[in-house]
Each structure stands twice: as C-alpha cells, then as structure tokens.
Amino acid sequence: MAAEFSEARGAFSYLSSGTAQQRAGQQKLNQKEGKDMRKFLTVSLTIVLVFLFSSADFCQGQVIKWRAQSGFARGDFSADLMPTFVKEVAEKSKGRLIISHHYAGDLVPADDTLKGTTQGIIEMSQSCGVLWSDVEPVLGLQFGVPFAFKGTLKEVENMVNTAGLYKLWEEAYARQNCQLLGVHTYGPYPALASNKPIRKIEDFKGLKVRAILSIAGLMKELGAAPGYIPGGEIYMALKLGTYDAATYSIDAIRGFKWHEVIKYYILPYWVDWYFGDIVVNKDAWNKLPDDLKKVLKDAMVNFGNVNKEVYEKELNIVTSQAKQLGYEVITLPDADVAKMRQIAIDKVWPTVAKQNADCAKAVEGFKKYHEVN
C-alpha cells in the first residue's frame, strides 16, 4: 500500500514538474476538451428530448378512425341525430377519434349490423336491441313490455336499472363481443295509426294490424289479427288497405309520412318510453385510452338528452297538430285501458318470461317494481 502511495505521489511530482508553458498548454487543451464534451452532451440531450417529445406527441395525437352504422334508414330521428354524436366526439377528442356515420345498409346489410360490429367489420353501431332479439332475446326488451315501461323517463330508467335489465343488456352484448356504450330513448310505443276507428276495447277484434313482439302478443289477446311487414312497406300497406292499422315509433307519423294515409291516432301508449342503443366492437373499445373512452361516454349522455328533447317535441306535435296533419286522435276510456293492462300482465308478461332465463329475471323485476303478483 505504501509503495502504491509513493508511485502515485511520484507521478504527481512528475506532472507538476513541467514548465509553465507546458502547463498553460495543457490547461487550454483541457478547457477545449471540456467545452467539446459539454457541447456533445448538450446536442445529444437535445436529440433525445426531441425524440421523446415527438414520440409522445405522435402517440397522443394519432388519429383513430371508426365507422358507425345505424340500423335504420334516413327519416328515423335517432339515426338522423348521429352526426351530432360523431361531431362531439371529434371535437372533444381534438381530432384523435374520427367516426364516420352511415345509414342502414351502407356498409353491411341492415340485418347484419350487429354481426358486423361483433366481427369488427364496423367499429360501432346504433340501433334498437329489438332487432337482435333472435340472437339475444333479452335485447328485445329494449322495445318495452306493454304496461311495464310506464311513467316518466326517469321512472322507466329507474325501473330498468332496479329490475337488473340494463345489466342483462350489457351481458348480452358482451356475449356478442360488443361493449354497450349506453341507451337512448325512442319515445313512447306504439304509435298506433289506423284507418278504422278504435274507440273501445271491442274495436280491436278483427283489426288487421302490423305489429311485432309483445305488442303483437297483446293485439292478439285483444282479438286483433297482427302481422308483420318491414317498416319501409307500411306506408303503402296503409294506403292500399292491406293493413287496417300499424304500429311503429312516433317518428313514423311525419318522418315516414304516415299522416298522409291514416285517419286515426290511438292513445294511450302501451309503453311510455322504449330504448335504442349504441354499441362498440369490444376489441376496438379495449384498444382505446381511458380519456377517449370518457369522451365517448360523455357524448352518449348528450346524445341521449338530444334524443329525449326531439322525441318529446314530436310527441306533442303528433297530437296537438293532428287536425292539420289530417287525422283524428282517439283516447280509449280509462276502464278499457285498465282491462288491457291486466290482460298484458296475465297473458303477455308470462310469455315474455318464457323466452329464456334473462327474460324471466327481467319480468320478475318488473313485477316486483310494480308490486304485481
């Protein structure tokens, strides 16, 4: 150890023994090398930082492009409102998520809208679960069940949640590789338009009426003869007398111009509020960062509010402007409505419950909520 110390000290003495000129030269050389090293480190650090920040900006700012198809054609209010949804998403995501909107059949056949979303052919779809009830029967309950979906929109939404129905919808879509983004209202159902007067419960007997699912079930129990044709064919069926009456959502009266070919509009509605939804392919959803998921969820809430406003406005128009539109509004007597409600509970609700276990759970939830035995 002492020898090592002596050698080190000798070396120090050797370095210190040079001339003043040599020492000055060495000092300048050291200063130059120090400046060069600092310059090198500064440039290197700048390059690294530029790379890191540009990479972050790229990841943060990359544009994700989705395609969304509605299950309905132009003239359906909710489908026509989808541009407001995609615009909000584009704005609030600052251009990071761009969704193009398309009507039924534009990208995939209308009947394959859910299938296309499941498979990722399209990333998003907007429709009503009733269209997919053959795949997942519980989704048909978005359509409402006669005299179960009664009350204000908040009351019906509360019943849907209390009965566990919303959770069942989420699970049903998850089985189809889809994420339920949320639901929106289509207003009341059915808009029952007729060319024969229906002033009492007995007037349903023999009525040829276009109707579907549980609405058709109640029509049958009332003595009517329900049948089905696609929505786009109803106008001519009413005009030609193929059907005496038809059911649809309220936007059909003006949006599909039914007012031109009907004489009567029958109240009250059997379902005060029914629902549609927006769903996202599960794989596409899982790839999104959390902030874009929030953008979509917030836009869904606003889309629901806009739909509610539009349908409430239309709800008022189809009754208050009936004379100008060319038909008479008939409201059935309370006693007859009470009879219809009981028939629905006794005959229609059990039929709905028999479809599968999910539907049975939902109907039990309805009965509990409405305190029905």
Image (cartoon, rainbow, N blue to C red):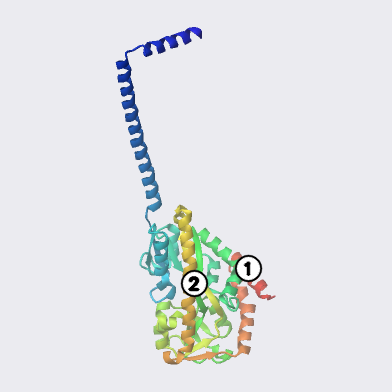
Residue 203 picture location, percent across and down: 55, 91
Residue ranking furthest to the top? 3
**Left or right: 275 with respect to 335?**
left
Judging by the rendered image, the residue that carries numbered circle 2 is 305
Residue drawn at x 52%, y 79% is 188
Disc on res. 124: none
Residue 85 picture location, percent across and down: 42, 67
Residue 220 picture location, percent across and down: 56, 82
Does 131 sit above or below residue 246?
above
Q: Nearer the viewer, mark 2 or mark 1?
A: 2
Structural crowding at the residue carrying mark 2, measured as other residues with C-alpha within 10 Å and reported as few (<14), some (14–19) or many (≥20):
few
Residue 278 appears in view: no
Label 2: state its secondary structure.
Answer: helix
Residue 359 picture location, percent across and down: 59, 68
Structural crowding at the residue carrying mark 1, measured as other residues with C-alpha within 10 Å and reported as few (<14), some (14–19) or many (≥20):
some
Whichever of labels 2 and 1 marks the residue nearer the N terminus, that label is: 1
**Left or right: 314 with respect to 204?**
left
Front one among 42 and 310: 42
Judging by the rendered image, the residue that carries numbered circle 1 is 162
Q: Can you tell which quarter of the image residue 236 is in?
A: bottom left
Front one among 366 and 325: 325
The residue type indicated by label 1 comes to Thr
The residue type indicated by label 2 comes to Asn
Does 55 sit above or below residue 225?
above
Label 1: state its secondary structure.
Answer: helix
Does 327 sit above or below residue 96?
below
